[in-house]
Image: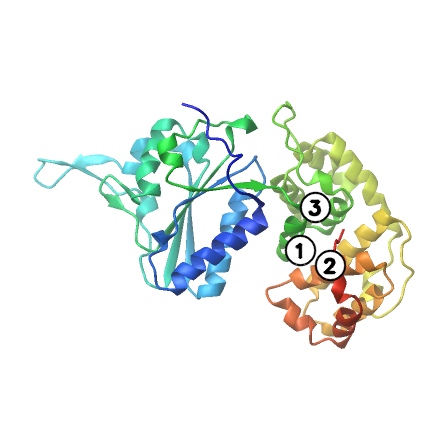
Amino acid sequence: MKDVKVTNIPSMDIGKAVEKLSSAYCAVISKGLPVNTMPSVMMWGPPGVGKSQGVRQIASKIEAATGKKVNVTDVRLLLFNPIDLRGIPTANEDKTLAVWLKPKIFQMDDSEDVINILFLDEISAAPQSVQAAAYQITLDRTVGEHKLPDNCIVIAAGNRVTDKSVSYKMPKALANRLLHIEVEGNFKAWREWAVRTGINDKVIGFLSFRQDYLMKFDASSDDLAFPTPRAWEMVSNLLNSVTGDLDEAYPLVAGIVGTGVALEMRTWSAVYKDLPSVEDVFDGKSPALPTRTDAMYALTASMVCYAREHKDDLTKIANSIRYAEKMPPDFSVVLLKDYMYIGENYKQTLMKIPEFAKWLQSKGSLLNGSVR
């Protein structure tokens, strides 16, 4: 049987996939239709591109739009066998028939104010015997006598056979039961997510300077450490929680993204020592702007991080917007666009600030243009 090819299916970044899918699910839910009106979804993509994170973003968007509680059940099919999905056999009360104990994954809240998402991760890495058990889940929403509740969305994800990770050929019968999307890396979508979720400013600044380092997966390479969105989230956690000093953290960062990229990031981070004080900027002072492009990326990332931590202090935010007026237009657009990502509906908060309204009048037309 031939491999499932991904060239004839839509390809989009994870942000667009989240937007399209959550919008479709919300439309179905708001009309009171069964959630299985939408077919089960299969997201293909290289390791670390953000498929698992995307499912959690979909859950958050559905929760925000519908007011319903969304529970995500994450099932790593690589670790399962067919018995795990169907349940353990045992005798009935009069010991005349075999019955199957219900697996915990089917113990879902079927309340009207709840939506469940069953996330079948690493489905392409599961042996074909386990993939066969997924037939019923994806279409009939059952395994044996066990049935998913009517309020359950099914989303699957996995690596492509061409990624040379652990991956089995998906049977055509299963493939034809799914809505397929190929997920690709995209810096703009990643940056929006990174600002909103508190990714370390050094990671955002460096990747703004070297956007090509967001995703460096090469199926033909034997490298064990390489940059992906998942890897950069790990680097961010390290810098946020262990040490923010890249000289000290270098060996650990190198173990995540590789020595070459980590060395370049450590060299780039030297620009931080010459940056103007971010506290001075937000206190209304007017320190000199950097002249180097790499330093401007670092400054805007630092300002976004500081703004996120002080988002309720509109005086400080206003001071920083006044300072942004001195920046080259493309950098001020990056900065103010990131401010809008700080929180859900934070743009409405920014609109209360006269300096932001003034900035929109003078430079708002650039928001839909080509931004670094």
Q: Position of residue 278 (x, y in %)?
A: 81, 60
In the rendered image, the residue lying farthest to the front is 8
Q: Residue at x 40, y 59 (%)?
A: 28
Q: Secondary structure at mark 1?
A: helix
Q: Mark 2 Cα within 10 Å, few/some/many (few <14, many 20+)?
A: many
Numbered mark located on residue 304 in the image: 2
Q: Is residue 351 above or below residue 60?
A: below
Decide which of 280, 4 is in the foreground and name it.
4
Q: What colour scheme has been applied to the protein in the rendered image?
A: rainbow
Residue that badge 3 annotates: 239
Secondary structure type for disc 2: helix
For image coordinates 74% across by 57% down, the residue present is 369
The answer to whether residue 84 is seen in the rendering is yes
Alpha carbon distance from label 1 to label 3: 15 Å
Kind of residue at disc 3? Leu
Kindly report which numbered mark, 1 or 3, lies closer to the viewer in this rendering.
1
Give whichever of discs 2 and 1 has the lower sequence position.
1
Q: Residues within 10 Å of mark 3 (few under 14, many from 20)?
A: many
Number of numbered markers? 3
Mark identifier at residue 227: none
- The x, y position of residue 175, in whole percent, is 40, 35
Locate the N terminus and report the quarter of the image it occupies.
top left
Label 2 – label 1 distance at C-alpha = 7 Å
| Residue at (66, 38) in percent of width and height | 215
From this viewpoint, is residue 59 visible? no
Label whose residue precedes the other's in the sequence (1 or 3): 1
Residue 132's quadrant in the figure? top left
Mark linked to residue 195: 1
Circles 2, 1 touching at the beta carbon (< 8 Å) = yes
Instruction: Inspect the image, locate mark 1, and give the three-letter code of the amino acid beneath it.
Output: Val
